[in-house]
Image (cartoon, rainbow, N blue to C red):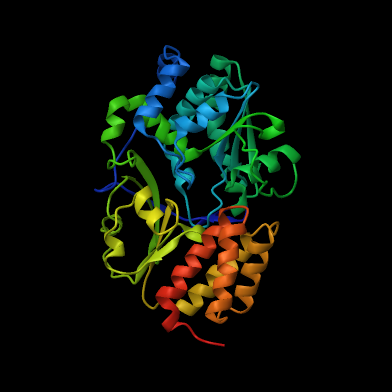
Amino acid sequence: MKVELHGKVIPRITTLTKPPYLESILRDISLSEVLERLQSLSSEEIIHLVERSNLRGRGGGGFPLHLKWQLALKNRPPRILIANGCEGEKGIYSDFFLLRRSPQRIVLALAASIKTLGVSEVYFALRHEYLSEGDRLKPYFHMVEDLLKVRIHLFFTRGRYVEGEETALISLIDKRVFAGFPLDKPPYPVEKGLFGYPTVVSNVETLAQLSLVLFNGNGYSEMGSQNCNQGTKIITVTTSSGTYVGESPLGVKVKDLLSFLSNDYVGVHIGGLGGIILNRREELEVPYSFESFRNFGTGLGAGLVVLEEPFSPSQYLVSFLDSALTESCGKCVPCRSGLSLLFRRPYLPEYIREEILYLMTKASLCGLGKGASIFLRKFYKDFGGELGSK
């Protein structure tokens, strides 16, 4: 059974709780009690806790949260905080999972961020299908507003892929336009963001990690592996039989994240439009970590699409290009024209194709063009012999 919400189909989600997945983290915390405890911590103490934890953003880039905070604090107030729950990647339900299962975790971290940064306003952005999740947050927002004397706005987006990029989201909120577009950097949002003020944009899952740091203290460093891969990751696994979501420590091998599956598979597509396909045995042995995926040239994806037999590389390539072209905002030429040309002629000679992918990697404004080029380069390398020709 599937429930359709305002145009997006939310599948029936099965929660993964058996190892390596964690059964329950901070589901039953008393938010009012924790908020009172938070008042006893100074901003400097909170920053120190975050720095010691090595917490890195879960939005894709993996930028250390304490460094983003420190850069914002170098700029004079007023400052603005944006919580990014747009979740524009197809088939990813990490934010939905957290908002439905543990909204207290998100609100606790939101309050800590507000106190640390001394922000005057907060914008909590959700994709428009998550209206009920927004309603569930409102009572918690009122508690934080009363405690910290701040205004929290709920902002709903169309849910397009590009709106997950921080400057595109800022332009969407700022201009109240139909669609947001990525902005040139510098200046960076922490210097000049929403309404021209220093702005910190934090992914919803990053906030969930922050709550673990605040609640568990030194115990956070024991989650996951070492080498700046502490903490957990919310992972969506999509198969022909259903959609599964669970929370796993970082550093677990990719194949172990799929150990609950009973059927064989060809490979796994990790990270969606900005990701890659792992299809070799040794690739499935790599740990799910920032460093492992950096070696592939990509970021830490949130979704695993299991590729099962019968698998047609040609059909998958056309489907990927169609999705990427549909999600492209069209602002920058390398992404817009590159994807359009490859969609119309996916079997171009290699030297022409490589020139297109090079320009997409180097000159695209946001992660869509860059990420798609990395996916395509590896895809053509791994499956080129199985693709048709024109």
Q: Is residue 251 above or below residue 192?
A: below
**Residue 165 at least partly seen:** yes
Residue pictured at 29% horizontal, 53% vertical: 287
Question: Residue 47 occupies which quadrant of the picture?
Answer: top left
Image spot of residue 357 (x, y percent): 56, 67
Residue sitting farthest toward the bottom? 390
Direction from residue 289 to residue 314 in the image, left or right: right
Image spot of residue 231 (x, y percent): 34, 38
Q: Is residue 318 above or below residue 153?
A: below
Residue pictured at 53% horizontal, 64% vertical: 373
Q: Is residue 104 above or below residue 57?
A: above
Residue sitting farthest toward the top? 40
Image spot of residue 63 (x, y percent): 47, 40
Image spot of residue 154 (x, y percent): 63, 34
Direction from residue 106 to residue 260 in the image, left or right: left
Residue pictured at 32% horizontal, 25% vertical: 217
**Residue 28 at least partly seen:** no
Quarter of the rendering occupied by the C terminus? bottom right
Residue pictured at 42% horizontal, 83% vertical: 385
Number of marks in picture: 0
